[in-house]
Amino acid sequence: MLRSSMFALAAVGLISATAAHAGHRGSYGPEYDYAEVLRVDPIIQRYDRPVSREECWQEPVRYREPVRYREAHRDRAPAVLGAIVGGVIGNQFGHGRGRDAATAAGALLGYHVVRDDQRRHGGYYEGGREYVRYEQRCRTATEYYPEERVSGYEVTYRYNGQIRTTITDYHPGDRLRVRVDVQPVP
């Protein structure tokens, strides 16, 4: 019986200590209460919102056909005539064997002068015409539009006669939940 009485007494003591401790809420953590909200001002953040779009247009592009030289069918008679005239002129210079060399050089020179002239003016160029074709060109253009958004709220509130200010990320309404932390002064 003594044993049961001691056990009952210990249990009652433990329950009373727990109840006394539970009545003192500050020792287990913070307490919460509500404060009166006096003023709420939104905090506005300004930023530029990018908007991209594709711009396309038709751009003129000039093209030229490749140029090709075509030789015309040439008559050799003018070149032979040039050789004869060159030979006659060359024959007017020099004496003896020098005259023969001057005649041959004049004939050769006359032939090539006429032949080069025929090449320059006797052929024709084909192609080389220029034309314009339109091609689509595109680019991405980005424009920035100013926008505003609420990034938080500056809240002025009263608790126990004191006026304080805090910042929240939500609109609190008429009352604000506050943490009450009572600490003993050492």
Image: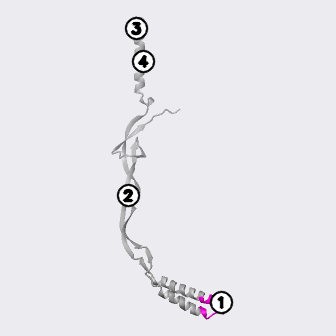
Q: Are marks 1 and 2 in contact (CB under 8 Å)?
A: no
Give the residue at mark 4.
14
SS type, badge 4: helix
Q: Is residue 65 left or right of residue 91?
A: left
Is-magenta flag for residue 95? yes
The answer to which quarter of the image holds residue 173 is: top left
Which callout, 1 or 3, points at the residue further toward the start of the chain?
Answer: 3
Tell me which secondary structure the magenta stretch mostly adopts: helix
Q: Nearer the viewer, residue 168 or 27?
A: 168
Q: Within the image, what quadrant is residue 67 found in? A: bottom left
- Residue 15 position, x and y percent, is 40, 19
Task: For marks 3 and 2, give the CA distance.
Answer: 77 Å
Residue, disc 3: 4
Q: Earlier in the sequence, mark 3 or mark 2?
A: 3
Amino acid type at mark 4: Leu
Let me know if residue 53 is in the magenta part. Answer: no
